[in-house]
Image: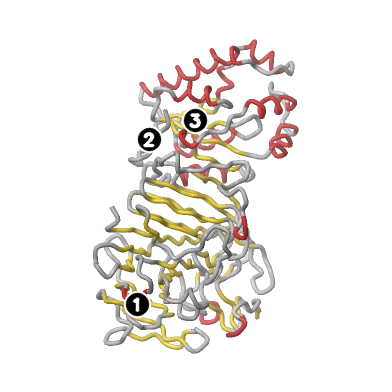
Amino acid sequence: MAFDTATGALPRMVLVVGVAGSGKSTVGRLLAGRLGWEFRDADEFHSEADRAKMAAGHALTDSDREPWLEAIGEWMSRATAAGRRAVVTCSALKRAYRDTLLAGRPDVLLVYLHGSKELLRSRLAARHGHFFPADLLDSQLADLQEPEPDEHPLVVEIDQSPEAVVAAVLSLMPRASGLGTSAAGADPERAVHSFAGGGDSESPGPTGASWRLVRGDQSAVVVQLGAALREYVVNGRPLLDGFSTGSAITGGRGQLLVPWPNRVGGGSYRFDGRSLQLPLTEVEQGNAIHGLLRWTLWRLLARADDSVLLGTTLCPQPGYPFLLDVRVEYRLGPDGLTTVVHSTNTGTEKAPYGVGQHPYLTVGTDLVDSAVLTVPARYRLRTDDKGLPVSREPVDGTPYDFRSARPIGDLRLDTPFTGLDRGADGRAVVRLAHPSGTRGVDLWLGEGTRYVQVFTGDTLPEGERRRGVAVEAMSCPPDAFRSGTDLTVLQPGATHVLRWGLSPWGYA
């Protein structure tokens, strides 16, 4: 039986599976150490006869493995009955083997370590003094039946350090306070896995691979290109004006904006005594716009039914000679979709940094004019004809005061707001509601968000204008690289976190 994560409870036990060379033992020990749990390696349960057989280059048969699996399962049951929490590692190559270990133990989370045949072979070739010879890898791969959706595996790619693998597991697994974020089970018929391809898409198309997340009546799609959020649907209703399968991304839809959101005027700025020039990517206005990672293919690090973790490296380049490790986690939870962006300065010098994301919200109206908008901001930034801030002005008494909900009407918005009023939970909430008032979506701004840009899409190509409202969580205002206003300076080894999310209402 698969672990039931619907309550977000911490599992009593984690079963780490994968073929030889996937790093099960190393990852298992590190994970147990981080959790403060007991650790057991399935190799400890092999008989001397089994060890000798494998050392001689002979693969174990199912009859050989049967008493071994039973011994592991019995130990797991005893540990659980005694109230102990543990991490257990086992190859568990076939579905039947995993069923033996999980049957009657619904509180065990399955973690599958996935890697390419070439990577596994190179690891085994470098391993010395182990009873399992590298030559048996082919027999393991022949036996391997990768976990199915109804097993609700947490899948982690192993082409990263063991510490990073453990961090990915802790990020996506249900947890107690301080260890991870609550995950949830999903409908196995709707959750699609394609481990070898790294995504759900057989023909990746112009945005690379894609990953569909599912929880109850919610689903979301994330694409490899720029780690962009393509789709968010609740009870059959789309809440994003995104882009379709096989289409290119236009208008910045769902894109991550790293290492700056919005614009840098002229693309030129000074930092730490140096004059730097970024490529001009908004040529008509002479600006550098929306960062450097929008058109990068990000790497899958880990995934579960309702969550995915992607990462990339921002290497030093003209105009931005700094080194960043960037990761983004998307997760569906009981209250909606949460996005968390972590950026770490892995270089040797401090780096200027800002971040944002560019989703377009919709509540099903043909145009945004009739949609009802709430923006809990006391100030707006007035911008020039190049979209660059020239002053900060109170919204009170102006057409830009959306602190009380009202229809957008024909107002053209491409407006940064700040002075955000937050609730007791530290979040500011931008609400887009259907004219009926019966349903809508809240975009909440959490850790690392100081500004929000609202854009009604009036400058988009014909047919895309005013179809959705871009509500962009931002850590800093436009042109922060030049003004220095609320710019984050990342010291070597430091990490910045941006946290935002979508909470639908009225769609039950």
SS for dot 2: loop
Percent position of residue 193, x then y: 54, 42
Percent position of residue 457, x then y: 45, 76
CA separation in Å, label 2 and label 3: 14 Å
Asked if the residues shown at circle 1 and circle 2 are in contact, with their CB atoms under 8 angstroms apart, the answer is no
Quarter of the figure that contains the N terminus: top left
CA separation in Å, label 1 and label 2: 43 Å
Per the image, the residue denoted by label 2 is 4
In the image, what residue type sits under mark 1?
Asp
Residue at position x 58%, y 27% in the image: 93
Per the image, the residue denoted by label 1 is 369
Q: Nearer the viewer, residue 396 or 238?
A: 238
How many badges with numbers are in the image? 3
Check the image and report above or below for 222 versus 114. below
Of the image marks 2 and 3, the number of the one nearer the N terminus: 2
SS for dot 3: strand
Of the image marks 1 and 2, the number of the one nearer the N terminus: 2
- Does residue 494 appear anywhere in the picture? no
Q: In this view, does 247 lie to the left or right of 232?
A: right
Per the image, the residue denoted by label 3 is 15
Percent position of residue 486, x then y: 46, 74
